[in-house]
Image (cartoon, coloured by chain):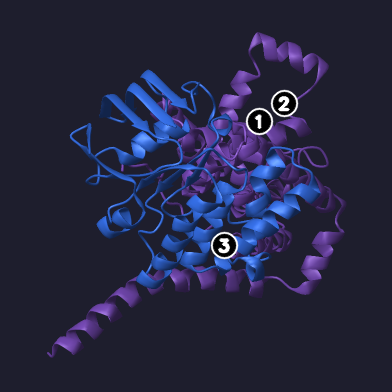
Chain colours: A purple, B blue
Amino acid sequence: MSPRGRDRRFLGAMAVLGGTYVVLLVAMVAADLLYTTPGHLWRALGSPEIRYAIRLSLLSCTLTTLLSLWVAVPIGYLLSRFDFPGRPLLDALLDIPIVLPPLVIGLSLLILFQTAPLRALERVFPVTYAVPSVILAQFMVACAFAVRTMRNTFAQINPRQEQVALTLGCSRSQAFWRVVLPSAKSGVLTAATLAWARALGEFGPILVFSGATRLKTEVLPTTVFLELSVGRLEAAVAVSLLMMASAVVALLLVRSWGGGGLPGPGGGGVG
Amino acid sequence: MIRLDRITLRAGTFHLRELSLEIPAGSHTVLMGRTGSGKTTLLEGICGLRPVLTGSVRIGGRDVTHLPPGERGIGLVPQDGALFDHLTVRQHLGFALEVRGWSAERREARVRELADWLHLGPLLERLPAGLSGGERQRVALGRALSFEPAVLCLDEPLSALDDETRQGILGLLSGLRSRAAITTLHITHNRSEAEQLADRILHLRDGRLES
């Protein structure tokens, strides 16, 4: 066989192997689309339980996103700019929610809220099996993704920009607000979108920590679970399609904001 | 005048130990040396971007060893310009003046003056993404000089430019001496650039400064 023919065969084999996954993905979405009808979708959207789940999902995901950014921006900045004792440990610790089974996060939150100080708090401000527990469960997972995104975003920004701002008369905080954060705008938007999308799909920790009570702690993944458990497959698929559409929109937004890559931290030389 | 008195600096595992240097006021001193010899580390120590472990840094007779970078009166032009991606050329030229609380009229007058000198007038509303390499370095130079610092530090500002653009900026740097009484410390690898501008050429070799 000619070298050109061998190259074609090699590239063809790669395309077939990779293409299997793509075909499966497309077939999965197509099957969902064919299973449901606009009528199912309208009926699902008309149900008070599902409308409540949509409202709670939108509210909790938005609050989770804001809380995640509140935490991810400072942690990401500190991790990308400063070397301090225990930094590798902290870095690894922040990845735990990404690798931990979601159910374990829910269980750990439940155990945490059984400790004396948090039980005392719950007497004044109920968290477990209430709406705040949904937000906390979503936050514990989504925030880790926002932190990772912000850390990589700040690491991508040339530290020289900040140093020049310091020589121009900025304090450290002025340099951050005037130079670093505006440069990180697309990273912040990406982190927010990822956190929002991640929170929307969270189910395991919510099931354990918040329960699956209709019109109380029911979010969209809970709806899919509850509808499935009572055999209403059409409603479960309709809600799944809603979540799928939200995920695709989030993904498109992340791509348009240039948040596809996750490069490592930068470093300085001695010249 | 810049005076370094037995300063020690560290960058990771690299050290510059007990380095002393005196740069006369208004002079253009060029610092040369191999990659990794510590030129940028020394510049960062002078600018206050890297802590001085021992010794002192004096600028114009004032001990600035422990002052923050913004209070040292040093303008810095890094190798890549390090422009702020979200700011226009006009905003770059007025950045330090705004931070330092100059009035809008004074700021605008200074921006106009710098833009005329650096031929940046038609580019004032452009973002860095729309500038060529030479234009970027002219903006970085204008930004560094905007607040009329006593010292200008140049860290290989011409290394990434083509010959024609380099000559244009060399002309600006030569002309700078007649416009402002400024002490310049200039790092470069290029001998002809050094000879064209320098009153004095120093070499940083094995952690020591040699003329």
Q: Chain of mark 3?
A: B
Instruction: Indicate the secondary structure of the residue bearing disc 3.
Output: loop
- Quarter of the C terminus of chain A within the rendering: top left
Which amino acid does the dot numbered 2 rest on?
Answer: Thr
Residues A15 and A28: in front is: A15
- Residue annotated with mark 2: A128
User: What chain does mark 2 sit on?
Assistant: A
Which of the two discs, 1 and 3, sits closer to the camera? 3
- The chain that hosts pointer 1 is A
Q: Are marks 3 and 2 in contact (CB under 8 Å)?
A: no
Residue where numbered disc 1 is placed: A209
- The amino acid sitting under disc 3 is Leu
- Residue A225 in picture, x, y percent from top left: 66, 48
Q: Nearer the viewer, residue A113 or B129?
A: B129
Please give the residue where the numbered disc 3 appears in the rendered image.
B118
The amino acid pointed to by label 1 is: Phe
User: Is label 1 on the same chain as label 3?
Assistant: no
Which numbered disc, 3 or 2, marks the residue closer to the eye? 3
A9 to A141, vertically: above or below: below
Q: Position of residue A256 (x, y in %)?
A: 60, 65
Q: Which mark is residue B40?
A: none
> Along the horizontal axis of the image, is A191 left or right of A123?
left
